[in-house]
């Protein structure tokens, strides 16, 4: 049922945008941006539930929380960068959208370095001397 509501909101916003775009392109963009932000904010509650389940699973399996938190941060950066780039693309600014995506990728690599280091150290320990 929730998906139907989200799609309905998207369709209503799209029709409004198509009607308004010819007369007031700025308002059309604002409708698109506000609709996207509203959907994103709605999903944040769902994401919070997912994070709680993953934290519980990590605790029960003995995985260190630092790894889970790092992975969740990486996922968060990916989603936020994609969302921001899409909004900027909707405004017709492809070059800025590409820079947002690049920044997201670089920040993901920065966060991934400790995990990559641990994986490499583990592989080196497993190799015969």
Image (tube, rainbow, N blue to C red):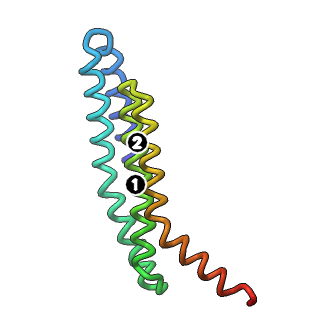
Does the image show residue 1? no
> To which quarter of the image does residue 65 belong?
bottom left
The quadrant the C terminus occupies is bottom right
- Farthest residue, direction bottom: 129
The image position of residue 93, as x and y in percent, is 39, 27
Distance from the alpha carbon under mark 2 to that under mark 1: 11 Å
Q: Nearer the viewer, mark 2 or mark 1?
A: 2
Are there few (<14), some (14-19), or many (20+) residues within 10 Å of tag 1?
A: some
> Dot 2: what SS?
helix
The image position of residue 125, as x and y in percent, is 65, 87
**Residue visible at 33% across and 34% down?**
9
The image position of residue 2, as x and y in percent, is 37, 47
**Residue visible at 61% across and 82% down?**
122
Q: Which residue is mark 2?
A: 100
**Residue visible at 25% across and 14% down?**
24
> Dot 1: what SS?
helix
- Farthest residue, direction front: 129
Q: Which residue is mark 1?
A: 77
The image position of residue 116, as x and y in percent, is 55, 70
Does the image show residue 121? yes
- Farthest residue, direction top: 23
> To which quarter of the image does residue 110 belong?
bottom left
Q: Is residue 128 left or right of residue 4?
A: right
Of residue 102 and residue 16, the one placed in the foreground of this image is 102
Relative to 87, residue 2 above or below:
below
**Residue visible at 44% across and 29% down?**
94
Are there few (<14), some (14-19), or many (20+) residues within 10 Å of tag 2?
A: many
């Amino acid at each position: 049922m929730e998906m139907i509501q989200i799609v309905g909101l998207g369709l209503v916003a799209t029709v409004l945008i198509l009607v308004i775009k010819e007369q007031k392109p700025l308002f059309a963009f604002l409708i698109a941006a506000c609709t996207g932000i509203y959907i994103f904010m709605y999903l944040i509650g769902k994401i919070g539930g997912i994070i709680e389940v993953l934290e519980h699973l990590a605790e029960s399996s003995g995985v260190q929380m630092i790894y889970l938190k790092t992975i969740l941060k990486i996922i968060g950066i990916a989603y936020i960068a994609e969302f921001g780039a899409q909004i900027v693309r909707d405004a017709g600014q492809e070059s800025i959208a590409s820079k947002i995506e690049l920044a997201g990728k670089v920040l993901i690599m920065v966060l991934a370095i400790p995990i990559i280091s641990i994986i490499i150290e583990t592989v080196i320990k497993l190799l015969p001397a």
